[in-house]
Image (cartoon, grey):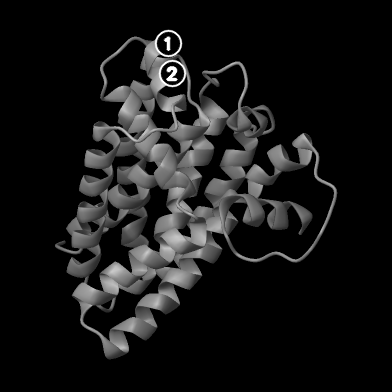
Amino acid sequence: MRGLLIALQFMTRIPISYKFQLSEKDLGNSSRYFTLVGFIIGIILFFTYKAGILLLPPVVVGAIVIIMQIIITGGIHLDGFMDTMDGLLSARPKEKVMEIMKDSRVGAHSVTALVALLILKYSIIVSLPKGYAPVFLLLMPVLGRWMLLYCLAFFPYAKKEGLGKIFWQNTSKSCWYLSAIFVLLVFIIFLPIFYLFSILITFLIILTPALIINKHLMGHTGDTYGAINELTEVIFILVCLVLLKF
């Protein structure tokens, strides 16, 4: 429970009144609860869509869902996505990319990438059938944080220091495999078995940018973890939209 509360405090803006002493190891070990945090976020998105669609058209509900997710998470992963896009799209050497990603100023690349990401995400959400949309939105943040965890467990850390390194040092491959079991169980409970293919397809697609980042930066950083989470969420619901055709 302690680890879950720490993970919730770090990854969301959900008010947690419980006070405790927090060490770096405690923070790092909380990564094992990331997929569960994703599930909690997903539940909120599920009911947001369910409530909204009773009164409003899908084109409005889609925007409300995205805004709700930004409010819940504080945009923590979107910030990482923007920094990552600013760096990688600059087409500079690793050292310069790292410098750009660290810069707090917002660049043209990051704004362009953010707008493109949100337009795509919104378009997919409003295109989902009302019967499936709430469940896909429930599972979307689960898979996003599962792939984030994959990058923590299987790729080196690209910087000598940073907040992301605390999680990287305390995340093992076994942690990711255990999270995979949780992901499979959640999918089996909420969707037909056929949609397990969405996990595999999304994983294989996201593996490409994860490998590209790893090759260019010689590892991952806290910003790129956020970028992978955001890309995974969009690709997952896009894959689900395609699978609905079969």
Q: Quadrant of residue 121?
A: bottom left
Circle on res. 165: none
Give x and y (percent) for residue 150: 50, 36
Instruction: Give the crowd class for mark 1: few <14, some 14-19, many >=20 residues within 10 Å.
Output: few
Kind of residue at badge 1: Glu
As drawn, 151 above or below 130: above
Query: 162 and 45: which one is in front?
Result: 162
As drawn, 114 above or below 204: below
- Residue that numbered label 2 is attached to: 99
* Residue at the bottom extreme of this rendering: 55
As drawn, 116 above or below 131: above
* Residue at the left extreme of this rendering: 245
Disc 2 to disc 1, C-alpha distance: 6 Å
Q: Residue at x 48, y 19 (%)?
A: 219
Give x and y (percent) for residue 47: 44, 78
Mark 2 secondary-structure assignment: helix
Decide if residue 136 is in sight here. Answer: no
Mark 1 secondary-structure assignment: helix
Q: Residue at x 62, y 50 (%)?
A: 10
As drawn, 180 above or below 72: above
Kind of residue at badge 2: Glu
Quarter holding the N terminus is bottom right
Decide if residue 57 is in sight here. Answer: yes
Quarter holding the C terminus is bottom left
Give x and y (percent) for residue 145: 49, 47
- Residue that numbered label 1 is attached to: 95
Instruction: Give the crowd class for mark 2: few <14, some 14-19, many >=20 residues within 10 Å.
Output: few
Judged by depth in the image, the label closer to the viewer, 2 or 1, is: 2
